[in-house]
Image (cartoon, coloured by chain):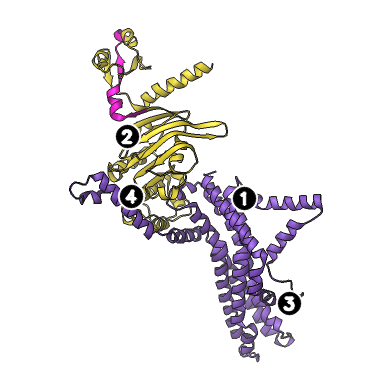
Chain colours: A purple, B yellow
Amino acid sequence: MNGPSNINPPGVTHSNMASESDTGAQAFSSAAVSAGRPLYWSVRRELWENRAIYLAPLAVAAIYLCGFLVNVINLRRHMRTVAWTHETFAMPYEMVATVIMGTAFLVGIFYTLDALYGERRDRSILFWKSLPVSDLTVVLSKLIIPLAVLPLLSFAITVVTQFIMLLLSSVVLLGSGLNVATIWTHSSFIHVSLLLLYHIVTVHGLWYAPFYGWFLLVSAGAPRAPFVWAFLPPFVIVAVEKLTFNTSYLAAMLLHRLMGPEAPTPPGSSMMDVMASLTLARFLVEPGLWIGLGVAAVFVAAAIQVRRYRGPI
Amino acid sequence: MACIEARGLRKSFGGTVALDGINLRVEDGRILGLIGPNGAGKTTALNAILGLTPYQGELRVLGRDPWMERDHLMRDVSFIADVAVLPRWLRVSQALDYLAGVHPRFDRTKAEGFLVKTSIRHDSKIKTLSKGMVTQLHLALVMAIEAKLLVLDEPTLGLDILFRKQFYDSLLNDYFDRNRTIVMTTHQVEEIQNVLTDVMFMDRGRIVFNCSMEEVESRYVEVMVHPEHLAAARASKPIDERQVFGRSILLFDLKPSPGRRQQLAAFGEARTPSIADLFLAIVGNQAGAAQGGAL
């Protein structure tokens, strides 16, 4: 503010000069601090506050690895009595993927339910709103966590865990008479990883979007107990629908949303078969995908508006 | 263009009117104190100015509509609510990182310079800091923002007298530079008396008094009247009378006839009233009158 006044050319009054240079500085800084920068820092902010986003899947992976190690050592001890089917090899790898993705899903639910409620409860919303960050940016940063950060993080953790599992079993079973190469071929590591990434992006990133949108909206508006506000209304509607019309459309809809867009497969088929059944073409023409994204967009837009009106509670 | 301009600003919550058609104009470079009893509408007025609440009527802050353009406005406006709004989980270093990341006018070096003078460590979490230290931190963050308007809502609530004094000292010495505008509310009226350039009293959603400090000095006089002059002094239309140690103190408004100062000074010892006494005389009497009328 003092700077420009020192370099005033003669004849230009201080106030004119100041306002001119301010406009210039403003234009410059809006370009420099483009829309992306506040969003980037807001996502980082979320990771500072909610360390469970990465600690929970990491902890689950670590515990699983311990269990797996015990399992492999037992396998080696009972080499002769074990039936060496494809299942024996593939099952632990599928299971770790399921467990970590399930953890990430749960973390995502608790995270989104608290995301816009916690800042009102601890009054810090007044601090966040005192900064030049729009409600749109704030809500988007909180949506990116369950739609992108959690899925990609759980994918990375899963792949690394599976890789460690392969190494562990190779080391333990080395010299046991079993060909270590069999383990690597049976686990078809790269293929499974790619399939997993595909599943995570399509189902966790896109198909589940309306769930997270709903949770964010509840989190932005609930006067207290967002958990109850999120789950009680659907539950009541399902019950009333059953009682009044003896139908369960909402329940079926929610269940279909939860189970994922994959085609029903015969019982006994592996998880990877189920994932592979969803081709990209089938996924993209699935009306449920686009309806879901539309519903999610409505929820998120509503959450942005609600946050504008809300203060500390 | 004034820093803040409001015409007919109204806001009600359900049936309760919080702002009852306020007209307000705050020029650049002023330090305005907004004084009023609890529930007078001070915080609602500040919230409207900061774009935290929708309102009826016309309001422009730095030429912008706060409710529609809060995020743009906040590049030029800083705000300290009361001290407890910094998130408890945040580390000091993270606060600096975040502000440097999102605020185009935040000067990190400057903030670190302020923090060096305190005992606040960069790796501390806010929940481990004392209330006084949290205020110091918030003030350091805000003073490192090149803002045009600073809004303080009860900034020193719950702080001891040393921290309160330090707070206003740094605000005046390190921050205020005549190009900036400060609007603040507080109940510790006597502590900000010497800081303010303007004072405004609010009561029940209305502005009941709005005056620069120079005007307060030239317009109001308080006389501790000698007992023998009491009858004459009372006949000179004081706006308020109170008793201290058995002596009567009468408050006069000189606006109707500015030449009266000499005449009134003859009744006893004359001086400029404190803002607190002025507030009691102006708002207290009105509240009393309203209550009397209702009864």
Name the amino acid, label 1.
Answer: Pro
Relative image position of residue B261 (x, y in whole percent):
25, 17
Q: Which residues are magenta?
A: B210-229
In this view, the residue in front, A236 or A80, is: A236
Judge depth for marks 2 and 4 and give the one in front. Answer: 4
Chain at numbered mark 4: B
Which residue is outermost to the left?
A: A10
Does the segment drawn in magenta span residue B219?
yes
Q: Which mark is residue B146?
A: 4
Relative image position of residue B221 (x, y in whole percent):
30, 20
Judge depth for marks 1 and 4 and give the one in front. Answer: 4
CB within 8 Å, label 2 to label 4:
no
Whichever of labels 2 and 4 marks the residue nearer the N terminus, that label is: 4
Q: Is residue A163 left or right of residue A29?
A: right
Q: Residues within 10 Å of mark 1 (few under 14, many from 20)?
A: many
Q: Which mark is residue B102?
A: none
Alpha carbons under labels 4 and 3: distance apart: 63 Å
In this view, the residue in front, B222 or B128, is: B222
Alpha carbons under labels 2 and 4: distance apart: 21 Å
Name the amino acid, label 3.
Answer: Ser
Q: Which mark is residue A226?
A: 1
Alpha carbons under labels 1 and 3: distance apart: 38 Å
Q: Which residue is mark 3?
A: A269
Name the amino acid, label 4.
Answer: Glu
Q: Residues within 10 Å of mark 2 (few under 14, many from 20)?
A: some
- The secondary structure type at the circle numbered 3 is loop
Q: Which residue is mark 2?
A: B196
To the question of a shared chain for discs 2 and 4, the answer is: yes
For residue B180, which quarter of the picture? Answer: top left
Alpha carbons under labels 1 and 4: distance apart: 38 Å
Q: Can you see residue A259?
A: yes
Q: Can you see residue A103?
A: no
